[in-house]
Amino acid sequence: MQFNTQKEADENTGLLIIPVINNNSEEIIKNKLDGFTVNSALFSGKKDTSYQFEINGRLILLIGLGEKPDVSSIEKSFRRVLSKNAGLVENAVTIDFPEDFTAELIESALIGFQLGAYSIGFFKQKKEDQKNFENLTVNVTAATTDLAKTIDRATKIAEAKTEGFKLVDLPPNVITPEYLANWAVMQGAQHAFGVTILDEEKAKDEGLDAFLAVARGSAKAPKFIIMEYRHPEAKFNLGLVGKGVTFDTGGLNIKTQGMVYMKSDMGGAAAVLAATQLIASLELPINLTSIVPAVENSVDKDAYLPSEVIGSHAGLSIEVIDTDAEGRLILADGLSYLVKNYQVDQLIDLATLTGSSVGTFGYECGALFSNSDAISDSLREAGMQSGEKVWPLPMWESYRSEMDSEIADIKNYHGKPIAGAITAAKFLEAFIHDHPSWAHLDIAGVAFGDSEFSKTKSGTAFGVQLLLKFIENQL
């Protein structure tokens, strides 16, 4: 898309989009349409409503945002334009924002508008009348200062979220550990951050035994991805780890249902990869080290076994109770490697880890675990601001005994249908080497799911804007 800024909406015949706030709808419409009015019974600006009509040959689309619009609802409302009203759009559109729209609200609208061009139909045959919005001209009119800066920022966020969508939505014969490694190398070259890929041999030399154990059953080689973004005026050092299981059969504890959705088990990796791209593209003044342990959890003669005892980068021996509790094993090595090799002030991991978190929160928010009230409060606040909500669950030491093993230092699953998300977090805590500012985000219920923008479950890029807001709140 090509964005242009304007002081006033032009008079061409392209679609004119006007966002309308409910408590000021009549005044907004009159001001934007030279005294033209719309009967309030047809449209009054209520949330999730729209109204389209024509004036002197020009198409008009009014978008209702309600009385107190938030960034999440605005993004969704504007995503509907290209996703559901593509027939109204030809070569150009104009978005004419009311005067009281802040830069933050404009940003959310422009992010959503660009996300509307995304479709998961990657392998469908192209239809002759299928729209392509790559060359669409978008004219933006707003009273805010630095509009060009807002547009540029919104475009970078939308690009990162689109990558987050794709990484989850593409099938597992495309999204392999090697694909993720190549993606990181490509983004590193484009956005000037360093990338190191540890293959199987190098991972073995580094003692990443838990990571390698999970990968043993797959024909697809594992990749331990390390990304390093550095800024000369960095305010702090942040470490991220994202669970990168590109497909999860469950291993020998094979899944009995829902396996078709397990291409989404790298939702944490998608968030970390896309967030790293975004942070680098925005040139935020922090130092960032991101690690994605990328594997496929599959089944063959070499697959790791229930009751097997494996090693780990931290030096702890792990009794494998369930091979379907594999995500915490690769995260354990990722966390330990990051803490041991990099001096980070804050440490955050994101993972589609447990069904237990979904049982607790449904599809409304992610589960938040932390050993620091400060980082926990900051993430919760950033979640409310960004619309990507997370909420804390306890990390009491009494839960730690659930992971005790008779034969090894720790076991990977307590084998009980209770407190699954909490005990998984306690397992991970054993591998952070007492880092004082760590948070674990279990995003199993929010990284992939039903959406009005797709007929099947699809990726959400959950975590990208949460991490951005979390970082910028500290700058």
Image: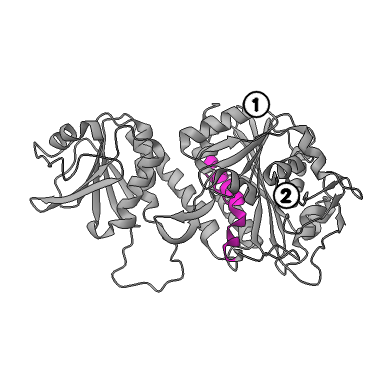
Question: Percent position (x, y) of residue 252?
Answer: 76, 66
- Mark 2 element type: helix
Q: Is residue 278 magenta?
A: yes
Query: Could you classify mark 2 by the number of other residues whose Cα lies within 10 Å: few (under 14), some (14-19), or many (20 or more)?
Result: many
Mark number displayed over residue 288: none
The answer, for residue 471, to whether it is visible in the render is no
Per the image, the residue denoted by label 1 is: 373
Compare residues 166 and 285 and report the one nearer the observer: 166
Q: Is residue 29 visible?
A: yes
Q: Within the image, what quadrant is residue 425 found in?
A: top right
Look at 56% across and 49% down and name the residue there: 445
**Marks 1/2: CA distance?**
23 Å
Magenta span main SS:
helix
Q: Are marks 1 and 2 in contact (CB under 8 Å)?
A: no
Left or right, 195 with reference to 24: right
* Amino acid type, mark 1: Asp
What number is the disc on residue 328? Answer: 2
Q: Amino acid at mark 2?
A: Arg
Q: Is residue 456 left or right of residue 235?
A: left
User: Residue 166: where, in percent of width, then height?
Assistant: 50, 57
Question: What is the magenta range?
Answer: 260-281
Q: Whole-percent x and y of residue 81?
A: 30, 52
Which residue is nearer to you in this view: 10 or 63? 63
Image quadrant occupied by the C terminus: top right
Question: Residue 392 or 235: which is nearer the viewer?
Answer: 392
Secondary structure type for disc 1: helix
